Image (tube, rainbow, N blue to C red):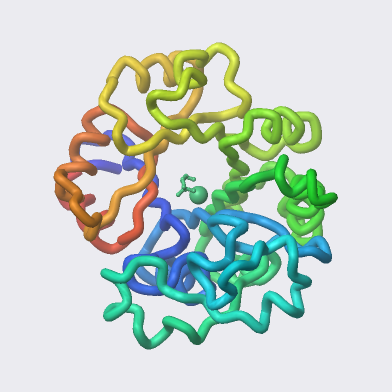
Amino acid sequence: MNRDGSRLPRVIGHRGAPGYRPENTLASFSLAIALGADALETDVVMTADGVPVLRHERDLGLTTDGEGLLVEELTLAELKQLRCRERWPERRARSARWDGHLEVATLDELLLLVAEQPRPVELHLELKDPDELAAAGLALEDAVLASLRDHGLDRRADTRARAGVVLSSFTPGCLHRLRDRTDLPLVQLVDVDDPVCLDLDQPAGGIGIAVSRALSDPELVARAHRAGLGVTAWTVRDDDPGGAERADAQVRRLLDLGIDGLFTDHPDTTLLGREVW
Ligand code: G3P
Ligand code: CA
């Protein structure tokens, strides 16, 4: 609880703790947990042989040594031969020990990591490019639900025992399909200038929306809350190149708007804000 008795927003490690380790790797997720993040966010795509794996985009050249390759062109065995690279040049010094040494993680490996933790860690799984993968004959929703089922996580968690899974996507059709197949909480990702933001009576997801941190409209948050939807905001980071607004100022502004959770690249410094939230 906050000092004034109000509820604290959740701190969600965005792709783990990518301010310190290459994003979406087990090292990045482990660090986010160690730093105290309430939850982890990751992006799920799929290999040619149908395995859900954790990359922000299908193009492997931005975060691995697999230049010119798409994730759906490789089998898991081939993908595991690649090594993850730091995306941001500004972060290479800090993540040098890990840069170029880590494998691409599978969703299954992340679920095992979370299961090993002595405390509940919520997982926010973003399904990336489901329609593009479907065009390649790959059913991302099926694969994610099957993987969750293998771990007993495909239904709403008993939150007294564990933190559970939230599914999200920028693709409304993906969330509509998931709504018919699972009772897991669903979150529609939106840019604040996206019209879907204005259509809160018909959210594709079930429990909330996640918006870009450019959010500045308190009425949007209030309307979402009136519609029974939570609001989370992405992404706070300490080292935004050319960022005009400092991370602590971003957090303050978003909290003042009444949001329910923050995606952050630096869970430690975001959590420090709890001293004053
Ligand atoms: O899931 C919230 C956020 O991660 C969405 O944006 O581009 O970082 O996947 P992006
Ligand atoms: Ca994401």
- In the displayed structure, would residue 74 be above or below residue 257? below
Q: Is residue 69 left or right of residue 14?
A: right
Q: Position of residue 82 (x, y in %)?
A: 61, 80
Look at the image and tell me in which quarter the N terminus lies: top left
Q: Position of residue 150 (x, y in %)?
A: 80, 61
Q: Position of residue 154 (x, y in %)?
A: 74, 48
Residue 118 visible here: no
Residue 104 visible here: yes
Q: Residue at x 31, y 30 (%)?
A: 215
Task: Looking at the picture, tell me which residue is in the foreground, 91 or 5.
Answer: 91
- In the displayed structure, would residue 36 be above or below residue 9? below
Image quarter for residue 258?
A: top left
Q: Residue at x 73, y 30 (%)?
A: 179
Task: Looking at the picture, tell me which residue is in the foreground, 108 or 85.
Answer: 85
Q: Residue at x 28, y 78 (%)?
A: 94
Q: Residue at x 35, y 58 (%)?
A: 265
Q: Position of residue 22 (x, y in %)?
A: 43, 72
Image quarter for residue 219?
A: top left
Q: How many marks?
A: 0
Q: Is residue 238 left or right of residue 232?
A: left
Look at the image and tell me in which quarter the C terminus lies: top left
- In the displayed structure, would residue 111 be above or below residue 102? above
Image quarter for residue 240?
A: bottom left
Residue, far front? 68
Q: Is residue 172 left or right of residue 98?
A: right
